[in-house]
Image (spheres, rainbow, N blue to C red):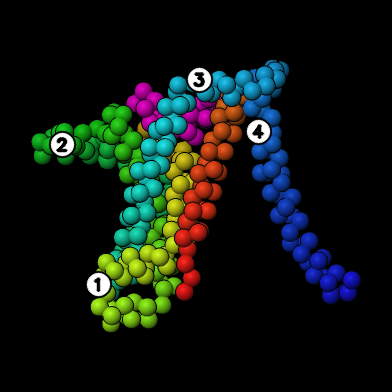
Amino acid sequence: MTTRKRKERAWYALFTLPLLIVFTTVVIIPFFIGIAYSFVSWDGIPANPKVFVGFANYADLLRDERFLTSAWRTIEFTVLALVLVNLLGLVFSLLVTSKLRGGNAARTMFFMPNLIGGLILGYIWQFIFTDAFKFIGEKTGMESVFFNWLIHPQFALYAMVIVFTWQMAGYTMVVYIAGIQGIPDELNEAAKVDGANLWHRLTKIIFPLLMPSFTICLFLTLSGAFKIFDVNLSLTKGGPNNATELFAMNIYNEIFGYGNYGLGQAKAIVFFVLVAAVTLTQVIITKKREVQF
């Protein structure tokens, strides 16, 4: 081995090993400890014993109606959020990359909600969905639409979708803008010369060439919607009557609310497998549809 190669390997090890040690310490080891906890019955008190119960926790979670309800609610929330976030993000990106005046100001305004944490956004929108909506309903007589959404099981879920969309649409807009700006102007100009209208340019040129951006945005939206916790906590706290308790909050309540560490960890493992399966499937499908130019 030459001196140059030894130096290259030394530099590689110098920059890689610390990251590998940190990743192993804070991600890999806790993950396997979590798997081990899912096979025991324990209340989280160090003085109390951990009793090995095998797959009993996994069998219990399948009989836990509250967990199954939260799973269905999470899927419902994720589908709605996935559509709205990406639709709005795409529309915003097309608007601000057109020759519309004030495009830069619009980019800033659309992206700004992403700079605010989910907890704060939840508290802000809690005021809107309760006091502001009630006030508008009383003044306009449209009380069937403008009422306290957070006390209605289905509308409380819609409220969470709106807040999540408000937070994420600007972020996906940035990804779509990068994709649109990477499309050569010559392609659009040639299509215009050939008589292609806006719809044909969108469906035949822009959308196919935007597939890498779709891959990223769909992945971010799917994983973010499945894992949402902060907005759930600050906006509805899982209410009314646990109707909006999503996956992450159900796991949190099981572990820290009821002290069922083993059952909570089993739920967390199932949650991880589900999110990983869905997001990996999405990435594989959308990657295959990406085209080069």
Category of crowding for the residue at label 2, using alpha-carbon neighbours closer than 10 angstroms: few (below 14), some (14–19), many (at least 20): some
Disc 1 and disc 2: Cα gap in Å?
A: 43 Å
For residue 157, which quarter of the picture? top left
Dot 3 amino acid type: Arg
Element type at mark 2:
helix
Dot 1 amino acid type: Asn
Which one is closest to the eye, mark 1 or mark 2? 1
Element type at mark 3:
loop
Image position, residue 177 (x, y; %):
40, 66
Q: Are marks 4 and 3 in contact (CB under 8 Å)?
A: no
Category of crowding for the residue at label 1, using alpha-carbon neighbours closer than 10 angstroms: few (below 14), some (14–19), many (at least 20): few
Mark linked to residue 137: 2
Segment tinted magenta in the rendering:
237-260
Image position, residue 159 (x, y; %):
31, 39
- Residue 190 is left or right of residue 269, and the answer is left
Mark linked to residue 63: 3
Image position, residue 60 (x, y; %):
55, 20
Residue depicted at 42% across the width and 37% down the height:
75
- Residue 246 is left or right of residue 50, and the answer is left
Q: Earlier in the sequence, mark 1 or mark 4?
A: 4
Disc 4 and disc 3: Cα gap in Å?
A: 21 Å
Mark linked to residue 34: 4
Disc 1 and disc 4: Cα gap in Å?
A: 55 Å
Disc 2 and disc 3: Cα gap in Å?
A: 41 Å
The reply to whether residue 119 is visible in this rendering is no
- Residue 216 is left or right of residue 96, and the answer is right
Decide which of 83, 126 is in the foreground and name it.
83
Q: Earlier in the sequence, mark 2 or mark 3?
A: 3
Q: Earlier in the sequence, mark 1 or mark 3?
A: 3
Dot 4 amino acid type: Gly
Q: Quadrant of the N terminus?
A: bottom right
